[in-house]
Each structure stands twice: as C-alpha cells, then as structure tokens.
Amino acid sequence: MATTPEGRVKARLDKMLKAEGVWYYSPQAGPFGVAGIPDRVAIVAGQFVGIECKADKTKKPTALQTKCMGDIERAGGKCFVAYDDETIEAVREYIRARNSKRQGAGAQAEKPGAGAEQRDDRQADLFEWAATRGGPA
C-alpha cells in the first residue's frame, strides 16, 4: 500500500496508465537499478515515455534524473514529472492525443506475432550480411 506522498502519486499514475491500456514498467531502484531512470517507463503508440514521480510540486528531479530525461527526449522519447492529479491528467492527455494521432494516420494494432515472416526475413538478411563480413553465420 502506498503510504508516502510519492507512493500515492505513483499509485494514482499506475491506475491511470492501466485505465488507458498503456504498457508500463517500474524500473528497479536501489543498488541493482540504474540511477536517474524515471519511476515509470512506458510505451505509448510506439514512443518511449518516462515519468518521474514526486511528492509535490516543490520536489524537483535530481541533476541525474534531469540528465536522464534529457537523454530520453534527445533520443526521441518523451518525459514528464508527475506530482498531483493535474500533472497525471497532462500525461493522460498526451497518451490520448498520441493514440488518436496514430489511429488518425490509419495505423491498426497488430495481433501478437503479426509480421513474424517479415521479421524472420530481416533477421536472415542480417545474418547473411554479417557472414559476408566475417561475422557469425
């Protein structure tokens, strides 16, 4: 049960992400995790999204968290800092807009395993390419 203020923000964020049908993950924190990674990482319409949770608006991301979020955005991802219902709602609006834009472009969700033949062909091409350069055959 979420007992800290930040834990309550994470719980509300998780509930919203589930309601929106978003795949998300909570990276390992502590000595076995990577410092600076956002509290939640998600995929929204094919885009990597990082969400750092804070107890309230007075709490700011650390320098390492800020650097990591900048790296994610420079790589084409999107990051948010969530600390209350309003900022969680901003994440929801982004998710809905991104999903709407994707659907408006005519993209259709694939069934799991769809396109496997194309992936197999690309993998075979990669192995063939590697073999011509002395790589594993």
Image (cartoon, grey):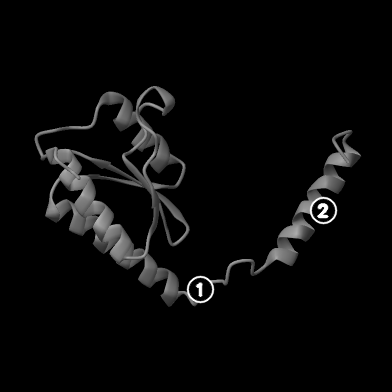
> What residue lies at 83% left-to-right and 40% top-to-bottom?
130
Q: How far across and how far down the image is residue 112, in percent?
A: 59, 67
Residue 15's image quarter? bottom left
108 left or right, relative to 65: right
Q: How far across and how far down the image is residue 27, in percent?
A: 39, 38
Q: Secondary structure at mark 2?
A: helix
Q: Is residue 38 positioned above or below 101 on the image?
A: above
Give the alpha-carbon distance from disc 2 to disc 1, as whole Å.
27 Å
Q: Is residue 90 positioned above or below 127 on the image?
A: below
Q: How far across and how far down the image is residue 77, in percent?
A: 41, 47
Q: Secondary structure at mark 1?
A: loop
The disc placed on residue 124 is 2
> What residue lies at 13% left-to-right and 55% top-to-bottom?
86
Q: How far across and how far down the image is residue 80, in percent?
A: 27, 46
115 left or right, relative to 122: left
> Which is more N-terminal, label 1 or label 2?
1
Task: Write down the residue under mark 1.
Answer: 107
Q: Is residue 45 positioned above or below 40 on the image?
A: below
Residue 79's image quarter? top left
Q: Is residue 118 positioned above or below 73 on the image?
A: below
User: Where, quadrant-wise, is the N terminus in this rendering?
Assistant: top left
Q: Nearer the viewer, residue 59 or 112?
A: 112
